[in-house]
Image (spheres, rainbow, N blue to C red):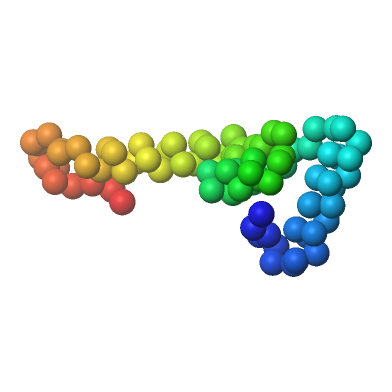
Amino acid sequence: MPDPAGDPRHADLVMAGLSAARAAGRPCGTAVGGATAAAEAIAQGFGFVVAGNDTTLLAKAATALVQEVRKVPVASGPDEGRRNG
């Protein structure tokens, strides 16, 4: 599991928590920042994984929409070819 903080103790503590949950027969989940990290967490045995949050998902969707709009040709008119951004 990648450690965004860069401190190896963090990953060790997370894995210790997962081991303790398994030993107690309890589910254990984690939150990660993307698809690759989510797949790694599932492979490690986490029972549920949050792969993003509402703010991140909204920002990615907004960015994708802006990129899509920029690909659409501008209709002819007095400002033909002008775009902000």
Give left or right: position of 82 versus 59: left
* Looking at the image, residue 18 lies above or below residue 13: above
In the rendered image, residue 49, in percent from the top left (x then y), is placed at 66, 37
Residue toward you, 14 or 78: 14
Q: Which residue is drawn at 84% across and 46% down?
A: 19
Horizontal relation, residue 66 to residue 25: left or right: left
- Asked if residue 15 lies left or right of residue 71, the reply is right
Q: What x and y, as percent, mark residue 47?
A: 72, 34
The number of numbered badges drawn on the structure is 0
Q: In the picture, which quadrant includes the N terminus?
A: bottom right
Image coordinates for residue 46, horizontal then vertical, percent? 72, 39
Q: Which residue is at 74% across, 67% downward?
A: 7
Q: Is residue 83 visible?
A: yes
Residue at the spot x=64%, y=40% of the render?
Answer: 42
Residue displayed at 11% across by 42% down: 80
Image x and y of residue 53, in percent = 61, 38
Q: Residue furthest bottom?
A: 7
Q: Specify the quadrant of the image occupied by residue 10.
A: bottom right
Query: Based on the displayed image, in which of its 4 quarters is residue 41 positioned?
Result: top right
Q: Quadrant of residue 45?
A: top right
Would you say residue 33 is visible in this rendering? no
70 to 85, vertically: above or below: above
